[in-house]
Image (cartoon, rainbow, N blue to C red):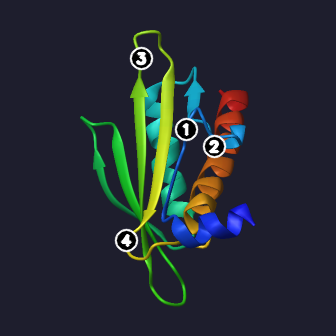
């Protein structure tokens, strides 16, 4: 019942270290920032109905959209990539519907679709490099 209430009243989902599901925690990687950006941009081109809007290099932010198939609803997806002085690269994400009070879980699915592919690609890249 909790999920139904959340789907009807929330139109944003974010990665957070406080999320009860560890899958949705920000990624902390010992991978160069440039590689994380490259993987992220490639995944956006591969995901169905996703489109790159803009890459803000100085902010380390990628803005993409996902448009629903039937009604054409648009979700704004922001990916924030930063690298600390310790060399650890972080990736955090938000997905937010442009209209409506609830998203039926779509923003969570947007993050899940991206992050599951991202995690796989990082593993593949690490094993081949």
Q: Secondary structure at mark 3?
A: loop
In three-dimensional space, the C-alpha distance between marks 2 and 1, rounded to whole angstroms, equals 6 Å
Q: Secondary structure at mark 4?
A: loop
Q: Residue at x 47, y 14 (%)?
A: 87
Residue under label 1: 16
Eye-nearest disc, 3 or 2: 2
Sequence-first disc among 2 and 4: 2
> In which quarter of the view is residue 127 placed?
top right
Eye-nearest disc, 3 or 1: 1
Residue under label 4: 98
Relative to residue 100, is residue 103 drawn left or right?
right
Give the answer, above or below, for where 91 lies relative to 50. above
Residue under label 3: 84
In three-dimensional space, the C-alpha distance between marks 4 and 3, rounded to whole angstroms, equals 32 Å
Residue under label 2: 24
In three-dimensional space, the C-alpha distance between marks 3 and 1, rounded to whole angstroms, equals 18 Å
In three-dimensional space, the C-alpha distance between marks 2 and 4, rounded to whole angstroms, equals 21 Å
Sequence-first disc among 3 and 1: 1
Tell me whether circle 4 and circle 3 mark residues in contact (CB < 8 Å). Answer: no
Give the label on residue 51, or none. none
- Which of 27/30 is in front? 27
What percent of the width, then of the height, locates residue 7? 61, 68
Residue 115 showing in the rendered view: yes
Tell me whether circle 3 and circle 2 mark residues in contact (CB < 8 Å). Answer: no
Q: Secondary structure at mark 2?
A: helix
Q: Residues within 10 Å of mark 2 (few under 14, many from 20)?
A: many
Relative to residue 67, is residue 19 drawn left or right?
right
Tell me whether circle 1 and circle 4 mark residues in contact (CB < 8 Å). Answer: no
């Amino acid at each position: 019942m909790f999920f139904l209430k959340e789907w009807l009243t929330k139109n944003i989902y974010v990665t957070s270290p406080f999320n009860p599901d560890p899958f949705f925690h920000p990624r902390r990687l010992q991978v160069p920032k440039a590689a994380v950006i490259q993987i992220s941009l490639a995944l956006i081109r591969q995901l169905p109905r996703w489109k790159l809007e803009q890459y803000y290099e100085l902010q380390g932010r990628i803005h993409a959209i996902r448009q629903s198939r039937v009604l054409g609803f648009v979700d704004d997806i922001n990916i924030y990539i930063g690298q600390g002085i310790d060399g650890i690269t972080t990736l955090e994400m938000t997905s937010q519907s442009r209209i409506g009070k609830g998203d039926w879980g779509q923003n969570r699915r947007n993050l899940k679709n991206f992050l599951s592919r991202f995690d796989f690609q990082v593993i593949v890249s690490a094993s081949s490099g």
